[in-house]
Image: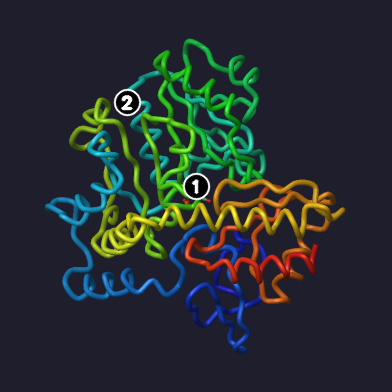
């Protein structure tokens, strides 16, 4: 008997009671190494003391402030995300809300145009974000969706060129399609997108999963030299506190004039206190370099130990965002559950990919311990 809707299907029958560092513990005391970060959220692990103490201090000071009043913490957080003042930001509570704000803003900037999105992309579950999520399993049953969304195939320049018309006002995409199977963008596709931006089409980059250091840069678009018109963030930004953000180039900022958008909880002091601590940590001199170094190590041991296995078709990554594509998709569920039995938590992506999103603070020894389990399971 449950009091909950079954929209998440049957949940994995484990009740975690506490967490420490990069480990979760269940009610029986069993320890699990976390290669999921709670789906890309706990980038700084479960013992990020600066974040915890900032939230504890903030809850004693003021836990909520309406957006009718000044909120210096929002200014502080935005100052880490604004690329030296080139962007202005809005805070929401989740990834889908950040994207919703981006889509609304794009409509204001380019009225009456189409927004192009890519097959197997994922942008969220609210109506606008879902309408941009070109996956049948996500959209089925919800018609009519928001009109004027068009689609093309990701990493296929010919498909992109065929799909863009004079009515295309914006293109929304991920630098690595996460839910869609950990598919990093190719250099020629990135180049083609930049050409369309030069022609006046807005680029909206969804960094909800790829952002906040996940790929070894603060945002993954930095690897490819993009200057997005709009980018969004969420997940790792709060390291466990719900927060989303949408940033737009200064030249478009005035389109969100007074009354055009808002949120009761967006940018609330608790989420902002946590986000400020997260971004302070990431801005430490060696932090992102260290992530890139660990990602290189991780890629190498994954390749050494797994690439030759017949059960493995391909291994893809950008930084510490990794996908192991299986030769036989019917094995996916079993791989996840066997890893779990051996004390390793991993995710799926698409229909045939084991997705790894370890906390960025994981040590090389911890990464290697997880790969040893994967070697046994795969
Ligand atoms: C790329 C991307 N965009 C948007 C979302 C939606 O974020 P949220 O679940 O916080 O609404 C996700 C969630 O997985 C995501 O990976």
Q: Is residue 294 above or below residue 259?
A: below
The residue labelled by disc 1 is: 210
Label 2 or label 1, whichever lies nearer to me, is 1
Please state if 364 lies on the left or on the right of 250 as rendered: right
Tell whether label 1 touches label 2 (CB within 8 Å). no
Q: Position of residue 193 (x, y in %)?
A: 51, 23
Front residue of 289/351: it is: 289
Q: Position of residue 102 (x, y in %)?
A: 38, 36
Label 1 beta carbon within 8 A of ligand 1: yes
* The furthest residue to the right: 310
Front residue of 163/189: it is: 189
The residue labelled by disc 2 is: 108
Residue drawn at x 61%, y 81% is 31
Residue drawn at x 78%, y 52% is 307
Secondary structure under the numbered disc 2 in the rendered image = helix
How many neighbours does mark 2 have within 10 angstroms: few (below 14), some (14-19), or many (20 or more)?
A: some
* The furthest residue to the top: 166
Which part of the image, by quadrant, shows the C terminus? bottom right
Give the CA distance from mark 2 to mark 1: 26 Å
Q: Position of residue 298 (x, y in %)?
A: 62, 58
Please state if 326 lies on the left or on the right of 48 as rendered: right
Residue 106 quadrant: top left
Residue 64 seen in the figure: yes
How many neighbours does mark 1 have within 10 angstroms: few (below 14), some (14-19), or many (20 or more)?
A: many
Please state if 96 lies on the left or on the right of 330 as rendered: left
Secondary structure under the numbered disc 1 in the rendered image = loop
Residue drawn at x 16%, y 72% is 61
Q: Is residue 277 above or below residue 152?
A: below
Residue drawn at x 69%, y 65% is 371
Question: How many discs mark residues in the rendered view?
Answer: 2
Q: Earlier in the sequence, mark 2 or mark 1?
A: 2
């Amino acid at each position: 008997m449950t009091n909950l809707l079954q929209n998440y299907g049957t949940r994995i029958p484990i009740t975690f009671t506490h967490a420490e560092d990069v480990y979760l513990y269940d009610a029986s005391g069993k320890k699990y190494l976390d290669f999921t970060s709670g789906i890309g959220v706990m980038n700084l692990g479960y013992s990020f003391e600066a974040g915890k103490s900032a939230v504890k201090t903030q809850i004693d000071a003021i836990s909520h402030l309406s957006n009718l009043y000044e909120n210096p913490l929002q200014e502080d957080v935005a100052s880490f995300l604004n690329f030296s003042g080139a962007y202005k930001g809005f805070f929401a509570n989740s990834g889908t809300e950040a994207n919703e704000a981006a889509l609304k803003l794009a409509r204001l900037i380019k009225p009456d145009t189409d927004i192009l999105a890519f097959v197997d992309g994922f942008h969220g579950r609210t109506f606008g974000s879902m309408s941009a999520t070109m996956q049948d399993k996500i959209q089925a049953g919800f018609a009519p969706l928001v009109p004027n969304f068009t689609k093309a195939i990701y990493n296929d320049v010919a498909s992109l060129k065929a799909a863009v018309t004079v009515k295309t006002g914006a293109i929304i995409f991920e630098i690595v399609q996460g839910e869609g199977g950990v598919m990093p963008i190719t250099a020629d596709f990135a180049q083609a997108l930049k050409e369309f931006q030069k022609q006046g089409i807005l680029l909206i980059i969804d960094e909800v999963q790829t952002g906040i250091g996940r790929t070894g840069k603060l945002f993954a678009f930095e690897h490819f030299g993009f200057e997005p018109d709009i980018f969004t963030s969420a997940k790792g930004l709060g390291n466990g506190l719900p927060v989303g953000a949408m940033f737009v180039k200064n030249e478009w900022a005035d389109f969100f004039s007074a009354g055009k958008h808002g949120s009761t909880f967006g940018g609330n002091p608790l989420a902002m206190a946590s986000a400020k601590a997260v971004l302070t940590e990431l801005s430490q001199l060696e932090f992102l370099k260290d992530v890139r170094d660990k990602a290189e190590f991780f890629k190498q041991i994954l390749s050494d130990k797994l690439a030759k296995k017949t059960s493995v078709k391909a291994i893809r990554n950008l930084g510490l965002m990794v996908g192991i594509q299986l030769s036989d998709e019917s094995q996916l569920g079993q791989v996840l559950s066997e890893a779990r039995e051996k004390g390793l938590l991993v995710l799926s992506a698409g229909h045939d990919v084991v997705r790894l999103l370890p906390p960025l603070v994981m040590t090389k020894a911890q990464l290697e311990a997880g790969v040893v389990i994967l070697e046994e399971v795969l």
